[in-house]
Image (tube, rainbow, N blue to C red):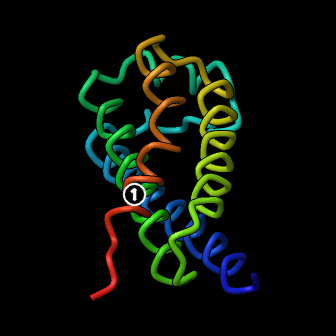
Amino acid sequence: MLRKIIAVIVGIVAATLLFMGFESIIERLYPLPHGTDRADHAAMEAYVKTLPSTALILVLAGWAVGSFICGLLIRIIARSADKTPAYIAGLFLTTAGIVDIFMVPHPIWFIIIGILLFIPFTLIGHSLYRKK
């Protein structure tokens, strides 16, 4: 049981780090306007509206990769085929994604795909690992 809890925590932390990595790449490609305060909701909303679709697709790719790695790490660390920890982590990541999505308005296509990708990619990562 403890091993599964640790696996979920490690998986979520790894996913979060990957999300941050992809977002830092996007910020390098599409920098915030000079002097923009991240706490300014209106400024961040205006910034997101200027982003091309490719930047938003990169965010979704980061979320998918992070979720996949999360599920993979859960399977490796927990040493169990039980999918419950992967579902829990996927649900946590989905909740965090929903919070992120609604903090700053995004296009509807991004919202739909974003909400729907965390659990499936976590489960795919979990189920692809096979012990030799």
Label 1 crowd (10 A; few <14 / some 14-19 / many >=20):
many
- Disc 1: which residue: 68
Q: Quadrant of the C terminus?
A: bottom left
Q: Quadrant of the N terminus?
A: bottom right
Residues 43 and 132: in front is 132
Q: Residue at x 32, y 43 (%)?
A: 61
Residues 121 and 46: in front is 121
Q: Residue at x 42, y 69 (%)?
A: 72
Tell me residue 65's x, y (percent): 35, 54
Q: Identify the secondary structure beneath mark 1.
A: helix
Residues 9 and 42: in front is 9
Indicate left or right for 10 with 54 as reference: right
Q: Is residue 13 above or below residue 4?
A: above
Q: Is residue 106 above or below residue 73?
A: above
- Please tell me in which quadrant of the rendered image residue 130 appears: bottom left
Q: Residue at x 41, y 48 (%)?
A: 121
Tell me residue 87's x, y (percent): 61, 52
Indicate left or right for 51 with 83 as reference: left
Tell me residue 9's x, y (percent): 66, 72
Q: Amino acid at mark 1?
A: Phe
Numbered-mark total? 1
- Please tell me in which quadrant of the rendered image residue 85 appears: bottom right
Q: Residue at x 43, y 37 (%)?
A: 32
Indicate left or right for 122 with 82 as reference: left
Tell me residue 33's x, y (percent): 43, 33
Residues 108 and 20: in front is 108
